Image: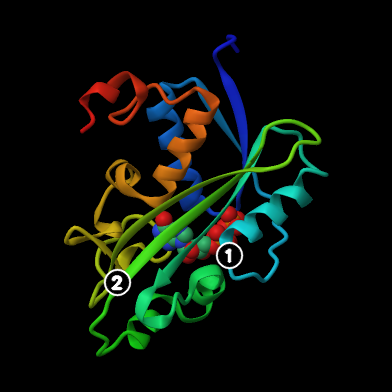
């Protein structure tokens, strides 16, 4: 590894998340950030806020894993359902799936929804986690569309297409995860490449 290179461990069992993080790391850091996966159980407390869940999980894991690493907690917040499934997104997806959400939303006019992602990053032993947050607003589609992505992607519509109709690169440009991860890379001084990297910052509006 050169002095510019860095390795980071992502604690997740979710293959979809991992694929997106790997592509983001490659694109934004120009290959300088290498991503390792630790698929270990994340202690998830019941809480209203993703921030609390991610902070707690990171603190527990810091006793078991060498930094730098991060955990990520994410969820889908549907306005007409008062933010449900929110922090319970993983459980709800397992239990009722996208069909179940569409049933709950049947006949509901307000279809606004937000995906949110919270990264809790620990840089060194005995340090507190630092949070990086991203969100994206869209709407719940009327039906399941697309075969890419994972989780709620086939029912989350952004600019006329569901996230499952976008390839990973397109989704990463606008997604909650893409935004949170860009903030982490900026913090690490590694956000060089890609369309939204520092090298191309002059082309941003
Ligand atoms: P880890 O805890 O192991 O990282 P998980 O799948 O349990 O994986 P979460 O506890 O953060 O992850 O739950 C988030 C759920 O929200 C996840 O199961 C997905 O169903 C959904 N979700 C989060 N981000 C998503 C995205 O970008 N696209 C589709 N669904 C997403």
Residue occupying the point 40% across, 51% down: 176
Name, please, the residue furthest toward the bottom.
107
The quadrant in which the N terminus is found is top right
Q: 6 above or below 14?
A: above
Q: 12 above or below 125?
A: below
**Secondary structure under the numbered disc 2 in the rendered image:** strand
Residue occupying the point 65% across, 59% down: 52
Few, some or many C-alpha atoms within 10 Å of disc 2 (few <14, some 14-19, many ≥20)?
A: some
Q: Measuring from the top left, give residue 47's x and y in whole percent.
A: 64, 69
Residue occupying the point 54% across, 26% down: 188
Few, some or many C-alpha atoms within 10 Å of disc 1 (few <14, some 14-19, many ≥20)?
A: few
Q: Measuring from the top left, give residue 106's x and y in whole percent.
A: 28, 88
Q: 180 above or below 157?
A: above
Residue named by callout 2: 112
Sequence-wise first label, 1 or 2 = 1
Between 133 and 42, the residue placed more toward the observer is: 133
Name, please, the residue furthest toward the front.
205
Side of 52 relative to 103 (left or right): right
C-alpha separation, residue under disc 1 versus residue under disc 2: 19 Å
Q: Measuring from the top left, give residue 14's x and y in whole percent.
A: 54, 54
Q: What mark, if any, has residue 49 been given in the picture?
A: 1
Classify residue 73 by image quadrant.
Answer: bottom right
The quadrant in which the C terminus is found is top left
């Amino acid at each position: 590894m050169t002095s510019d290179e860095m390795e980071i461990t992502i604690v997740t069992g979710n293959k979809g998340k991992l694929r997106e993080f790997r592509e983001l790391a490659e694109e934004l850091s120009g290959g300088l950030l290498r991503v390792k996966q630790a698929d270990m159980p994340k202690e998830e407390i019941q809480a209203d806020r993703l921030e609390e869940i991610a902070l707690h999980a990171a603190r527990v894991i810091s006793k078991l894993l060498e930094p730098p690493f991060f955990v990520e907690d994410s969820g889908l917040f549907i306005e007409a359902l008062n933010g449900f499934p929110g922090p319970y997104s993983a459980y709800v997806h397992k239990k009722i799936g996208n069909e179940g959400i569409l049933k709950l939303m049947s006949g509901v006019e307000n279809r606004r929804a937000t995906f949110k992602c919270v990264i809790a990053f620990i840089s060194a032993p005995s340090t507190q986690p630092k949070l990086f947050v991203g969100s994206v607003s869209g709407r719940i589609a009327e039906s399941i569309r697309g075969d890419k992505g994972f989780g709620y992607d086939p029912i989350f519509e952004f600019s006329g297409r569901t996230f499952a109709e976008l390839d990973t690169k397109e989704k990463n440009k606008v997604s909650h995860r893409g935004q949170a991860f860009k903030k982490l890379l900026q913090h690490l001084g590694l956000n060089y490449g890609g369309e939204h990297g520092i090298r191309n910052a002059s082309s941003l509006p």
